[in-house]
Amino acid sequence: MNKIIERLRNRGLKPTSQRIAVLKNLTERRDHPTASDVYNDVVKKYPTISKATVYSTLKLLSEKGEIQELSIRKMGEACFDSILELHHHFLCRECGKIIDIYTNCRNNCVIIKAGEIDGNIVEEIQAYMYGLCSDCAKKNN
Ligand SMILES: [Zn+2]
Ligand SMILES: [Zn+2]
């Protein structure tokens, strides 16, 4: 719990109980939840918290760089990730699961190697992959 408070303070955020609850929930899961997913969990412990509060807290935390908001969408809703280290995401079109993909292609990536594209300097790439996850692929066979 102290770690969560410290993380909020380091970002210049007052560690309110709601912010603590939201950030704690996000750091304890690896499923890249939407604001609704986080709300459904947090509300069990904090019945007075609103979905709007959870959403604005997640927005604030990503603006401050404490978490990241993914461009990938689950049922049209933004997904959040507490892992800031560069990694890619795979979305399963069958079960909607989002999987972390760690692949170090920095050294042989043709886009990074180009250094710049049309005058734009490429510093990092985050890929979004879509398809069938290994579980769903097995079921379909
Ligand atoms: Zn799947
Ligand atoms: Zn991730």
Image (cartoon, rainbow, N blue to C red):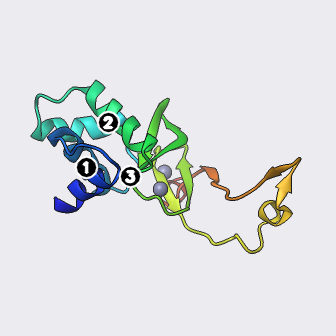
Q: CA distance from mark 3 to mark 1?
A: 11 Å
- Asked if residue 112 can be seen in this view, the reply is yes
In the figure, 107 relative to 62: above or below? below
* SS for dot 1: helix
Q: Which of the two labelled residues, at mark 3 and mark 1, occupies the earlier sequence position?
A: 1
- Closer-to-camera residue (39/14): 14
Crowd class of label 2 (few under 14; some 14 to 19; many from 20; radius 10 Å): some
Amino acid type at mark 1 = Asn
**Beta carbon of the mark 3 residue lies under 8 A of ligand 2:** no
Nearer the observer: mark 3 or 1; the answer is 1
Three-letter code for the amino acid on which mark 2 is drawn: Thr
- Disc 3/disc 2 C-alpha distance (Å): 18 Å
Q: What's the mark number on residue 25?
A: 1
Q: Which residue is mark 2?
A: 57
Q: Residues within 10 Å of mark 3 (few under 14, many from 20)?
A: some
| Furthest residue toward right | 118
Q: Position of residue 126 (x, y in %)?
A: 63, 54
- Report the front residue among 90 and 54: 54
The quarter of the picture where residue 48 lies is: top left
Q: Is residue 9 above or below residue 138?
A: above
Q: Amino acid at mark 3?
A: Asp
* Mark 1 residue's CB less than 8 Å from ligand 2: no
Q: Which image quadrant: the N terminus?
A: bottom left
Q: Position of residue 41 (x, y in %)?
A: 21, 41
Residue under label 3 = 31
Drawn side of residue 59 relative to residue 113, left or right: left
